Image (cartoon, rainbow, N blue to C red):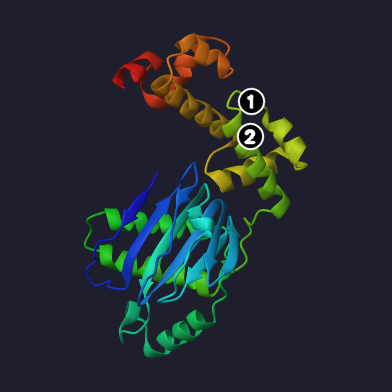
């Protein structure tokens, strides 16, 4: 679930590091600092809190938290909460050819960076540029440096000059998604219908389906099924219960049906998975 790129990219010295993470439990995130560089953390799903200079900053889906060069910061209470997020560390615009911008554009960027609020709301627009940046960094193409630089400029524009995002999800619906996800992970045998969930959230089925998929990357039913399979994998590995008992406790009508669904997700039967250790 974690991806990090911290190698030098030829002709793009501005990029120090970029990565993504999707922790399912709170992880340690203690004091750290980036001399000479800005850090931007974009929360794609869930929420995360940060501490700096004694102040607490809370972010959730669609927010970007940033720190300036030399600022010591950490996760609130020294941890990062379960959420999906991307981060990028860029050297400050001190070089004359920073990101190949013109002198006038560099001046505008410096001024905007200096005045940037600690938290920027961009909506979910940065998701695709971050994914494109990941793809560009992983490929071996003669256009690699150009593609990386172009995507960095695109992300910087979204941070410095955010535009309204039609995909912004209402705060009350975001809170409902968070409660729903917490219950799915707490009760993997829970089997609501999309109609039930949309009714509880007081939105139409189509709106619920679209916004939930935008928030998580999966349809509601797919997210429920994947969560059950992840819990099944954990139990098969860590517990001695029979496959039949695990299937019943996770709400499957039969062990045969469970095995069919399990193999579709893992390319192995439950018994094969357990035997692999």
Q: Image check: 12 left or right of 48?
A: left
- Residue 203 percent across, percent down from the top left: 75, 43
Q: Earlier in the sequence, mark 1 or mark 2?
A: 2
- Residue 115 percent across, percent down from the top left: 54, 82
Q: Secondary structure at mark 1?
A: loop
Question: Looking at the picture, does residue 75 appear above or below residue 199?
Answer: below
Question: Looking at the picture, does residue 240 appear above or below residue 135?
Answer: above
Q: Image check: 162 left or right of 72?
A: right
Q: Image check: 166 left or right of 79?
A: right
Question: Looking at the picture, does residue 102 appear above or below residue 247?
Answer: below
Q: Secondary structure at mark 2?
A: helix
Residue at which label 1 appears = 190
Residue at which label 2 appears = 183
Q: Residue drawn at (72%, 31%), measured in percent from left and top?
A: 195
In depth, the one of 68 and 30 nearer the eye is 30
Q: Residue drawn at (32%, 69%), measured in percent from left and top?
A: 15
In depth, the one of 271 and 96 nearer the eye is 271
**Quarter-of-image position of residue 259:** top left
- Residue 88 percent across, percent down from the top left: 40, 64
């Amino acid at each position: 679930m974690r991806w990090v790129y911290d190698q030098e990219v030829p002709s793009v010295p501005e990029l120090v590091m970029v990565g993504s993470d999707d922790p399912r439990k709170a992880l340690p995130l203690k004091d750290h600092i980036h001399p000479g560089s800005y850090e931007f953390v974009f929360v794609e799903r869930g929420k995360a809190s940060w501490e700096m200079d004694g102040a607490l900053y809370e972010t959730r889906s669609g927010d970007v938290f940033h720190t300036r060069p030399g600022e010591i910061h950490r996760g609130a209470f020294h941890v990062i909460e379960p959420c999906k997020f991307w981060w990028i560390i860029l050297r400050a615009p001190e070089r004359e050819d920073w990101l190949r911008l013109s002198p006038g554009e560099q001046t505008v960027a410096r001024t905007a960076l200096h005045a940037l609020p600690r938290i920027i709301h961009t909506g979910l627009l940065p998701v695709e540029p971050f994914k494109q940046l990941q793809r560009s960094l992983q490929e071996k193409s003669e256009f690699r440096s150009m593609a990386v630089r172009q995507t960095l400029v695109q992300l910087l524009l979204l941070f410095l000059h955010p535009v309204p995002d039609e995909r912004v999800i209402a705060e009350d619906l975001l809170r409902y998604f968070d409660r729903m996800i917490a219950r799915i992970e707490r009760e993997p045998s829970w089997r609501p219908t999309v109609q039930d969930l949309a009714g509880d959230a007081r939105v139409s089925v189509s709106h619920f389906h679209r916004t939930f998929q935008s928030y998580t990357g999966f349809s509601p039913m797919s997210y429920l099924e994947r969560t059950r399979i992840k819990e099944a994998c954990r139990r098969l590995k860590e517990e001695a219960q029979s496959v039949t008992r695990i299937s019943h406790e996770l709400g499957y009508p039969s062990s045969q049906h469970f095995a069919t669904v399990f193999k579709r997700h893992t390319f192995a039967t439950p018994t094969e998975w357990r035997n692999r250790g």
